[in-house]
Image: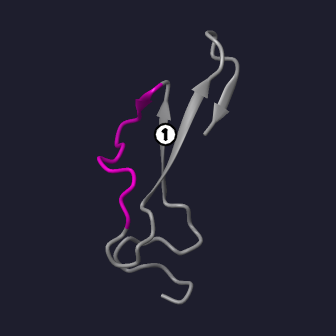
Amino acid sequence: MQGGRCPKCGLSPEEPGRIVLIDDGKPSAGFPDDPGECCKRCGHPLWCVVRLVYDDAEGEGVSVE
């Protein structure tokens, strides 16, 4: 690959993986069955999971994990 994209997953070594969200404890549509899955060819993680956490009942305080 030498800095290029993997022909199997299409990701470059610098990319974090495809971003998926968990908002309010519920995975969004299209969330992967195995968020820890890696490309079988290059070993790169396929998914970058972003979890939104609300700090208060009104949803005004939001943090990202």
Point 34% across, 43% down: residue = 30
- SS type, badge 1: strand
**In the picture, which quadrant includes the C terminus?**
top right
What number of labels is visible?
A: 1
Where residue 57 sits, quadrant-wise, is: top right
Point 29% across, 47% down: residue = 33
Furthest residue toward top = 57
User: Residue under circle 1?
Assistant: 21
Q: Is residue 34 above or below residue 14?
A: above
Where residue 64 sits, quadrant-wise, is: top right
Start and end of the magenta stretch?
25-38
- Amino acid type shown at disc 1: Leu
Point 56% across, 66% down: residue = 15
Q: Is residue 50 above or below residue 17?
A: above
The crowding category of the residue bearing disc 1, from other C-alpha atoms within 10 Å (few below 14, some 14 to 19, many at least 20), is some
Q: Is 39 colored magenta in this rendering?
A: no
For residue 30, side relative to residue 17 (left or right)? left
Residue 25, percent from left and from top: 45, 26
Residue 32, percent from left and from top: 34, 48
- By secondary structure, the bulk of the magenta-drawn segment is best described as loop
For residue 45, side relative to residue 65 (left or right)? left
Q: Is 30 colored magenta in this rendering?
A: yes
Residue 26, percent from left and from top: 41, 28
Q: Nearer the viewer, residue 63 or 12?
A: 63
Where residue 50 sits, quadrant-wise, is: top right
Furthest residue toward right = 61
